[in-house]
Amino acid sequence: MKKRLGIISLFIMLFIAFITVWNFSYEQGREEAYIPLKGSSLTPIIPSETGVFRRAEFALDYANMPFDKEHERSLETYYDNRAFHGAPPSIPHPIVETQNIGGNSCLKCHENGGFVEKYNAYTPVVPHPELVNCKQCHVAQQNNTLFKSGDYLKVNAPSVGDNNVLITSPPVIPHQIQMHENCLSCHAGPSAPKEIRVTHPERINCRQCHVLNNKEIKDIGVFIKEIKNE
Amino acid sequence: MSATLTSRRIFIKKMAATAAMTAAMTMFPGIIFASEQLAGISEGNLDWKKGPCRFCGVGCGILVGVENGKAVAVKGDPNSSVNKGLLCVKGYHQTMCIQASDRLTHALVKKNGKYVKTPINEALDLVARKMKSTIEKHGKDSVAMYTSGQSTIPEGYVASKLMKGAIGTNNLDCNARLCMASAVTGFLTSFGADEPMGCYEDIDHADYFITWGNNMAEMHPVLFSRMLEQKNNRGAKIIDFATRTTRSSTASNRSILFEPQTDLAVANAICYEIINNGWVNTKFVEDHTTFSKGLTKMGYGLEDNYSFTDKPTKINFAEYKKFLEDYTPEKVEKYSKVSAKDIKYLASIYGNPNKKVVSYWCMGMNQHTRGTWMNNLVYNIHLLTGKISQPGNGPFSLTGQPSACGTAREVGTFTHKLPHGVVTNRKDREMAARIWKVPVERIPAKPTYHATEMFRAVDRGDIKFIWTQVTNPLVSLPKTKRYTAGMKKDSCFVVVSDVFPTPTSDVADVILPASWHIEKSGLYGNSERRTQYWDKMVEGPGDTTPDAWMTIEVAKRMGYGDLFPYSKENHAEEIYNEYRQFHEGAKHGMAPLEVLKKESGVIWPYVNGKSTQWRFNSKYDPACDNGKDFHFYGKPDGKAVIWQRPYEPAAEFPDKEYPFWLNTGRVIEHWHTGSMTRRIPVLHKAMPHAYVEFHPDDAKALSIRDGENVKVISRRGECVLPASINKRGLPTKGQVFVPFFDENMMINDVTLDAFCPISKEPDYKKCAVKIQKA
Amino acid sequence: MAIKSYLAHPHSGQKEKLINELLALKNCEIIPAENKDVIILVTDTESDSDDDILKQHIETFNSLKLLALVSGFNTPKNDL
C-alpha cells in the first residue's frame, strides 16, 4: 500500500511538473516573434549640419597635397557642364548604361577622387555620397545638338573674391548649401577649381568663420530698432 | 562727399588687390610679395591696433585695422596664444555694428512720454540728482546698479567703489550672475579660490576632451578649433555629453545624450565606478582632499525674498562611498537614459591613469537649479583620480562673456563681493576701505539683492532707482514678462547706458549713449585668467562716453569727487593701477600695465615677471608652500573638498499638461541678446530670427512642418516662433530648443526664474512647455 | 567707375619688361610677386568703355602671356 501511494504521488508530481512546464512554454510560444529594435549608439544625424565635418579625416592630407597646376580645374570649366548655377552637373565622360547605381560604379572614383590618366584630370569628389542613384540627377550628354533652340537663361554664378565685407574678413558662403553641406569636397584637394580651393583645409570647422548669407530667399535688409515714444 | 568717395575707391582697390593676392596664393603656394608693398597697397594706410575680441569669454586677440580714424578691418592676432591668428565669424565682423544707423549717439531723457535729445552733461546732472534725492528720501538701499560681464575692469571697479565705498550699499549685481555664478560657488566650495586652475594650453596635452552640456563648436568656436586640430594631428578624442545633438556632437568621436537634470546622477555614477574599480588615486586623495556634505532639498528660489545658506559637515571616505551606492550605473541608467555601458565608458576614461582628460562646460552646468552641486561633482571626478592642475589634466569652466572673469568675478561686481574677498569678511572690508580711503563702517557687511531678486525688488517697489550698464536684462532675465512690467512702473527711475536701443532702453527714463569697446581704453579678463589691455582705437560718434567715465561724472556730481580723482584721458590706466593693489601677492598678482600693453594678454597670478599657467601645482605655482606636489591654498587646511551632492529633480518638469522640456541657448552667429551681432549685416542674414527646434518624431506627432509658426506656452507666458526641424540642432524626443537672441521672439517670457539656491543663478535650460499651432 | 584686379602672367624672362610697361600706364597699380612669375594688377577706370580700352591695350603687350581677371567692382555713378 505504502509503495503504491508513493508511486501514485510520484506520478502526480511528475504530472503537475509537466503541466507547469508545458504551460510556461506554451505562454512563451504565444509571444510574438520579433527582433528587438535598438537605436544605434551613433550620433543622430542632423541633415544640414552633418556634412560640415565629413571628410575632415582627410583634411591634413588635403593640406599637404601638392598643387598640380597642369591639371587644375577652373571655375569656368566647373560651370561648363552645369545648365545654370546650382543645377546638377552633367556627366562629361562616356559611361556604359550598366554603370547605374553609385555604390558599384560612380562612387568608385567620385567618392574620394584621384587622378585619371584617361581623362588627364582629377576626379571631382561628390558632396553627397549617400545618395547613390546618381543618374537620377546627373545624366550623360550624348550629343551636342538641340531638339529646338531656345532662349535659355543662365543664372550667373556668384563671383569669387568679393564675398568678404571687410578686407580681412572671411568670405560668406555665396551659394545655397542644400546637398552641398560638405565644404571640403568641392573646396579642397586637386579637383577643386583653383579659384575656390581653400588655403586652410585643416581647419575643418568651416562654418566657424564662413556663414551662409542667403538663408532667406528675399533680401531681409539690416536690423534696426525704432526708439518708441509712448 | 568727395573725400568719402576717394576713400571708398581706395578701399575697393584694396579689396580687389587682396582678392587677386588670395588667388595668386592659391595658385602659387609660398608666393611672396614685398612686405612694403603688402603694407602699402593691400592694406593701405591701415593702422593695426591690438585688443581682445568684444564677444565671448574665450578672449581671442584681435587686430583692428584703422584708416582715417575709422575701423575698417579685423583680423586675428597671430601673437595671441589664445587664438593664434584665428577668429570666428562674429569676431571678424565685430566692428561693423558701430556703424549701424540706429546707434545711440546722444543722451535721451523721457519728458511727457517722449524721448528728448539732451546734452550729456544735463543728462548726467539729472541722473546724479535723481540718485541723490532717492537716497535722501528712501535710504541707501533704494538705489541699485546692474552691470555686466562685458564691463571693462575699470568700469566694474568704479561701479563697485561708487556703490559700496561711496554710497555704502551692496545693491550692485551684474549679468554674470546669469551665467557664471554657479561656477564661482563651485570653485569656492571645492577649492576656496575662484577661476580655473589650468589654461588653454591643456588642449595641446589632453588625450580626451569631455564636454558637459556644452556646444563648443558654436559657443567657443576658436577653442573647439584647437581641439579639432589636436584630434586630427594627435588623435585626441572629443566626447560630447549633452541633452541635444549639435554641431559639436557631429564633430565629436562620441556623443552621449542624457535626460535633463540627470547629469547630477551620472556624475555620481562615474565616481561610484571609479571607486568600485579601484581607479582612485589614493595618495592624492589622502594628501590633498577632505570630504564634506551640505544641506539637501534646498528648494528652487521661486518665491520672493527666498534665502538659503548651506551648512557643510565633514564626512569620511566610508560615508561618501556608502552614499554613492545609490548611484550604480544600473540604477542611474533608469532615469538618466544613459546606458550603464556608456556611464562605465565615461568612468573608464577618467579612471585610466595613462590618459589625460580635460572636462569643459559652460551654461549647461551653470544654468542649473543645482549648478553649484554639478560643478562640485565634476571636481569630485577630477579630485578622486588626481587629474587636476597638470598640463592636459583638469576641469575647466568656460565663460560666456569677455570679462565675466576679469570684471564680474575678479573686481567683484556682485552684491556679496569686494575687489578682494567678500563683504561678510571684516578683513576684506578693511582692505577695501584702506585702498578706497573711506571709513570701514561705510561698507555694509550684509549682501542684498542678487540679479533675479534685484528685479523682483524693482517690481515690488523696494528699489526706486536702477542704473543698468552694458547689459540688456529685459531680454536676458528669465520670466521677463514679470520684470518688464516691473521696470515700467513709475515707482522706479530707470537709467540705461547702452550703445544701441534695446528692449531695456525702451523702459528707461534716461538713456545714456555709451562708447563701444574700441572707442575707449579698457581691460578684459578671459576664462583662462588672462588679462588683456587695449588702447582706444577710434573716436565714438556724438556724445558717446565710456561707461566708467559716466559713473565717475555721476559720482562727482553726488559729492564724491575726492574718491574719484581720475583724469578723463587716462582714467582706465589710473583705475587699473589702483585696482592692482587689491591682488598683490603670489596668489593673484596682476601684471603691471606696461607688460599688458606689450603682450597679447597675461595670465595671473603674475609673479616675478612670470605667468602661472597651472595653479595649485608646486611645479608651476610659486604660491604653493606646503612642501608637497599640490597645495590647494584657497582652503585654510590646504586641501580641496570632495562634496557629497545627491541627485534632485528639476524645479519644473514635463507633465500631462505641459509635456515638453524647454531648453534655451545660443547660436554661433549671434552673441547673447543680439543687440550687437544683429546689427552686423553678415550675421543678421546668416541667422535672421529665432526658431523652435523639434525632434522630427515630435514634429510629426504634432503635424508641424519646418518653418511653420508655432506657439510655445508655459505657465508664465508664451512665444510664437517658426519651427525648425533638422536644421541647426536636434533636441531629444520630448524636448524643444529655442535660441534667446531674438528680441522680437522673446523666449524668456516663457522661461522659469528658478535658481540654484547657493549661486542664485537661474536655470534657463529646463522648464515645462506645451506646443500649439499659431 | 570700374575697379578690377587681374593676375598678369609674363612670358618667361620678361617679368621686368612687363612691370615697366604696366608702370607706364595711367590707372594701373601693380604688385609684383617676389619669387614667382606673376604680377597683381589693379585697374581703376572711370567707365566700362575706358576699362575695355585699357584692357585691350594691355593685352597687346608682347611680354604678357596671360591676363586673368580675378575680381571686378562697379560702383554706381549716383555716388557722385
Image (cartoon, coloured by chain):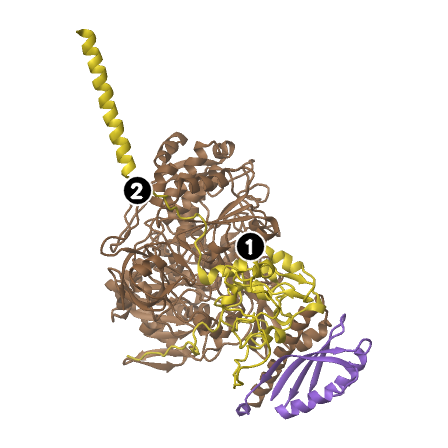
Chain colours: A yellow, B brown, C purple
Question: x and y percent of residue B358 in the render?
Answer: 51, 47
Location of residue B555 (image quadrant): bottom left
C-alpha separation, residue under disc 2 versus residue under disc 1: 47 Å
Nearer the camera: disc 2 or disc 1? 2
Query: What residue does disc 1 label?
Result: B228
Q: Residue furthest left?
A: A1
Relative placement, left or right, of A138 versus B709 is right
Given residues A31 and C37, the one toward you in this image is A31
Vertical order, B755 against B691 (above or below): above
Q: Residue furthest right?
A: C13
> Label 2 lies in what chain?
A
Mark 2–mark 1 CB contact (< 8 Å): no
Query: What residue does disc 2 label?
Result: A32
> Label 1 lies in what chain?
B
Question: x and y percent of residue B253 in the render?
Answer: 51, 50
Amino acid type, callout 2: Glu
